[in-house]
Image: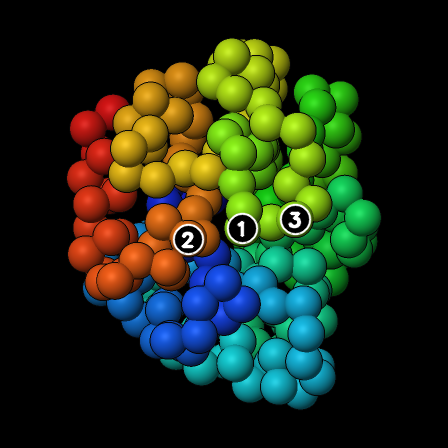
Amino acid sequence: MKKIGRLHVITDVVLQDRFSHVALAQMAVAGGADTIQFRQKEGSTRALIETAIAMKNACGDVLLIVNDRVDVAIAAGADGVHLGQDDFPIEKARDLLGEDAVIGGTAKTLSQAQQCIADGADYIGFGPIYATGSKADAGMVKGLEDLREMVNGVRMPIIAIGGIGIENAGEVMHAGARGIAVISAVCCQPDPTEATQRLVDQILKK
């Protein structure tokens, strides 16, 4: 059984510029996050690989997942990738990364989730559960009822994302999510380590 984390902290240097990807990874790991996701749209491939390698070193035994970039994940020795509907095909990523890699797929509908699973995904990223300003193309808010339907519709871990923070993480977990993925709820907080710890506490109450 592959380890699918319950708190995915997606590092960000656009919404905030106080901390680097590596510093955020270190603080989130210190706070108890079990998965770090590296997502950056801009920059050279070489720079992305260098950052991902440094993040992998900072993560230790904590999973490092690279968003979108299979090549960066391979070069950095990351634990896996997370791929959106318009990103590198999941089945091709599986061929390149092997069976041990953790691969997540984004799905906004049950049919998309089923296709991700058929293509070889290990978990489904579903959302936005609530309104979010962290991702401009997040799409329509799904809400807890749609989350429950997704959880009941697929036999695969669901990682909920979008507008999730300390005030609502508990209800998302009670709706059946395996875990949550957050950006601003950690990266944009005064103390990212403390913010991570508080989210972990909410998740463990489930």
Q: Are marks 3 and 1 in contact (CB under 8 Å)?
A: no
Query: Residue 153: image x %, image y %?
Result: 60, 14
* Residue type at tag 2: Ser
* Closest to the observer, 163 or 67: 163
* Residue type at tag 1: Ser
Q: Is residue 19 above or below residue 138?
A: below
**Which residue is at 61% across, 79% downward?**
48
The residue wearing badge 3 is: 136
Query: Label 3's element?
Result: loop
Q: Are marks 2 and 1 in contact (CB under 8 Å)?
A: yes
Query: Residue 160: image x %, image y %?
Result: 49, 34
* Residue type at tag 3: Ala
Query: Residue 164: image x %, image y %?
Result: 41, 37
Tally of marks: 3
Q: CA distance from mark 2 to mark 1?
A: 7 Å
Residue 134 tag number: 1
2 or 3: tag closer to the N-terminus? 3
2 or 1: tag closer to the N-terminus? 1
Query: Label 1's element?
Result: loop
Query: From the viewer's perspective, is 93 left or right of 155?
Result: right
Question: Visible in this render: residue 117?
Answer: no
Q: CA distance from mark 3 to mark 1?
A: 7 Å
Q: CA distance from mark 2 to mark 3?
A: 13 Å
Mark 3 burial class by Cα count in 10 Å: few <14, some 14-19, many 20+? few
**Which residue is at 57% across, 16% downward?**
146
Q: Where, quadrant-wise, is the C terminus in this rendering?
A: top left
The residue wearing badge 2 is: 184
